[in-house]
Image: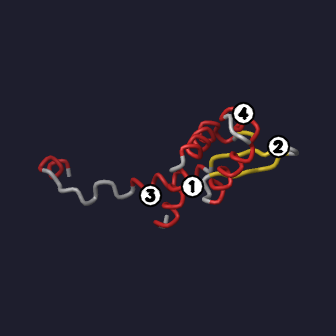
Amino acid sequence: MKVEKAAKQLEALGNPTRLKVYRMLVRAGDTGMAVGQLQERLELAASTLSHHLHRLILTGLVTQERQVTTLICRANYLEMNALVGFLVAECCVDAPRTAEDEVAA
């Protein structure tokens, strides 16, 4: 993942409302959640929710699918895992090695 893409996704998640929406979709699993359900549970105006969903969709963190007259939103787990992987991929690589590390290796 490129730094620019990660930065845009993290920026989108940096808004408390969008983070709540995203966490709710992550908890919903692969079946996702209808926009109306999200709106009801989060007690948001339709236009406000639409704005926040749009930002999450633009970054690739959320997908939307129309099922007849209902919009279903889902967390994009591939993107979520890529972002988390990007964040932890180089964890501690520049940390000094300790004597215990040398013995374990």
Task: Return the x and y of residue 73 as percentages of the image width and height.
Answer: 71, 46
Q: Looking at the image, is mark 2 or mark 3 nearer the viewer? A: 2
What amino acid type is highlighted by mark number 3?
Phe
Disc 2: CA contacts within 10 A as few (<14), some (14-19) or many (>=20): few
Pointer 2: what residue?
70
Instruction: Write the residue at 79% across / 46% down.
Output: 71
Q: Which label's residue is closer to the chain start, 4 or 2?
A: 4
**Mark 1–mark 3 distance (CA, rounded to whole Å):** 10 Å
- Dot 4 crowding, Cα within 10 Å, few <14, some 14–19, many 20+: few
Query: Badges 4 and 3: C-beta atoms under 8 Å apart?
Result: no
- Spatial CA distance of label 2 from label 3 is 34 Å
Q: Quadrant of residue 97?
A: bottom left
Question: Label 2 near label 1: C-beta < 8 Å?
Answer: no
Pointer 4: what residue? 40
Which of the two labelled residues, at mark 2 and mark 3, occupies the earlier sequence position?
2
Query: What SS does tag 3 mark?
Result: helix
Chain-order first, disc 1 or disc 2: 2
Q: Nearer the viewer, residue 63 or 50?
A: 50
The answer to whether the residue labelled 4 contacts the one labelled 2, judged by CB atoms less than 8 Å apart, is no
Spatial CA distance of label 4 from label 1 is 26 Å
Q: Secondary structure at mark 1?
A: helix
Q: Which mark is residue 79?
A: 1
